[in-house]
Image: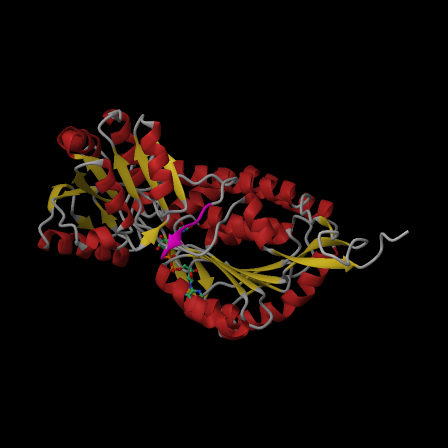
Amino acid sequence: MRMLIDGEWVDSSDGAADAIRDKATGELIDTAPRGTAADAARAVAAAQHGWSAMAAMPSHRRAAAIQNAADAIERDREELGRLLARENGKTLRETRSELDAAVRIFRGYAEEAKRVFGRTTPLDSVPGQEDSVALTLRQPRGVIAAIVPFNYPAELWAHKVAAGLAAGNAVITKPPEECPLTIGRIAALLEQAGLPRAAHQMVTGTGEEVGATLVRAAGVHMVSMTGSTEAGRQILRDAAPSLKKVHLELGGNDASIVCEDAELDKVADALVRGRFTSGNGQICCAVKRVLVDRRIFEPLLAALVEKTRPLKLGHPLAPDTDVGPLISEQAAQKVEAQVAQAVAQGATVVTGGRRRGAFFEPTVLTDLPADSAALQEEIFGPVLPLLPFDGFDEALRIANLSPYGLQAAIFTRDLSRVMQAFRTLQVGTVVVNHSTAIRLENLPFGGTKLSGNAREGLHETLLDMTEEKTLLMSGVLAQ
Ligand code: NAD
């Protein structure tokens, strides 16, 4: 693949490139340029023209271009889904549904592009301003850097790029190093959709070089990044001198609370899907801790183990694969080390626990001490720790102990518990009777504490990517 800078498909300025491999077999799929700071700076310079052209484009034309891109993604869904499965390791079932989400997000922003409303304010509440009125207009921020993680690259990027363009900005995309190819293919579809030159550009390469250059650049007016908390902190530090807006969607350690009145078989299905068979366990809002009423701990554990043991590890394109490889062997080694540490602290591996290359078996852990690192840190792989609780207040207290606060789930039929959880849990979303591994594009998604500083969703993000400007008209209503 090549990068897209100022309307041209180019290699890195120093010719460096990285191999992008099939994550299950190691087979070479393609190479991606390892962009340099100079490449990123060139994109920032070109984006200033892209921004002016976008801001001058009426919203009905911006909407039409985004709609065209959505139609093209939908047309190429199968081919894109196969490419994403190979470069990322998720099953084809999963990557198809990710592309469907990307299509919906592009379509959603095509509609939202036409609804960027300001407001009119009569000023007669202020003595002396009885004949004055003000109006506000939402204008594009300018140039947006869209920095994307590996786990759901097409979907998470769609939120940033479609929103940025819908609001009339220029967007520079920094795809994930591990799997940039699908974004590259969609970027080519976007190029044919009817946007001005340099409205969208894409610079591949590392976060430390390309990403950091974009974050620090005076010509970038907003950074929207999804990724790890550690990278998010660095981005905030790098962006501080320019005071640009920084939107961060970061890690999670989501708790699912299972009450004694829940339907155990359905809960077990939801937890297996939410931890093992979605994203191979690599989801920010995956089920990372399960808190279970002690009275149903043993039957739920038995149901979970029964549904986990038959899960099949395999190539993401094989129709009978339930769980594919993690993004790299190092990622699987990290999960292996986190499980070993939990075991050293007293945890029991009820099923799974072994690594083979980049594959990690779906693993159920019990007997974790309350201060175990596995309950505090994010484990980015198919590992499900189960803890008993005595009393609902204790469950809520344990759920809030995490330094993260993305989503939480509660399985119960008791509405008063639902409302207590909704009031008490320090998270962005409380999900009822479904695992935490759910994100719908028309809801505000995002977390508290170390999970981020913003909400992303069709309506919220469009507003975030505009700046409200006020026209104060003094005395204009006087007769
Ligand atoms: P990562 O932080 O390693 O990388 C994410 C992106 O940031 C990459 O494109 C990377 O190159 C870039 N980056 C890294 N350091 C940078 C820097 N200093 N300056 C600029 N850019 C930089 O994350 P990852 O391993 O790709 O993704 C996994 C993490 O993402 C997990 O922690 C997961 O929970 C989180 N995540 C969060 C959400 C959410 O919506 N909250 C969604 C998906 C993933």
Instruction: Please tell me whether residue 141 is drawn above or below residue 442 in the rendered image.
Output: below
Q: Residue at x 28, y 52 (%)?
A: 402
> Residue 32 at x, y = what percent?
46, 61
Tell me if 465 is positioned left or right of 84 in this view.
right
In the displayed structure, does residue 27 sit left or right of residue 3? left
Task: Determine the residue positioned at 44% across, 37% down.
Answer: 97
Q: In terms of depth relative to the viewer, which is nearer, 468 or 315?
A: 468
Q: How is the image coloured?
A: secondary structure
Q: Nearer the viewer, residue 329 or 104?
A: 104
Q: Residue at x 33, y 53 (%)?
A: 404
**Magenta segment includes 119:** no
Asked if residue 95 is positioned above or below residue 46 in the image, the reply reads above
Residue 347: x and y in percent read 11, 48
Q: Is residue 455 left or right of residue 50?
A: left
In the displayed image of the protein, which residue is found farthest to the front?
127
Residue depicted at 69% across the width and 65% down the height: 49
Q: x, y (%) of residue 400? A: 29, 48
Give residue 251's position: percent from left, percent from top. 35, 54
Tell me the quadrant of ligand 1.
Answer: bottom left
Q: Does the magenta run of residues contain 447?
A: yes
Front-lying residue, 69 or 383? 383
Residues 230 and 100: in front is 230
Specify whether residue 327 is in view.
Answer: no
Q: Which residues are magenta?
A: 445-450
For residue 200, above or below residue 301: below
**Dominant secondary structure, magenta:** loop
| Residue 240 visible in the snapshot | yes
State how many labels appear: 0
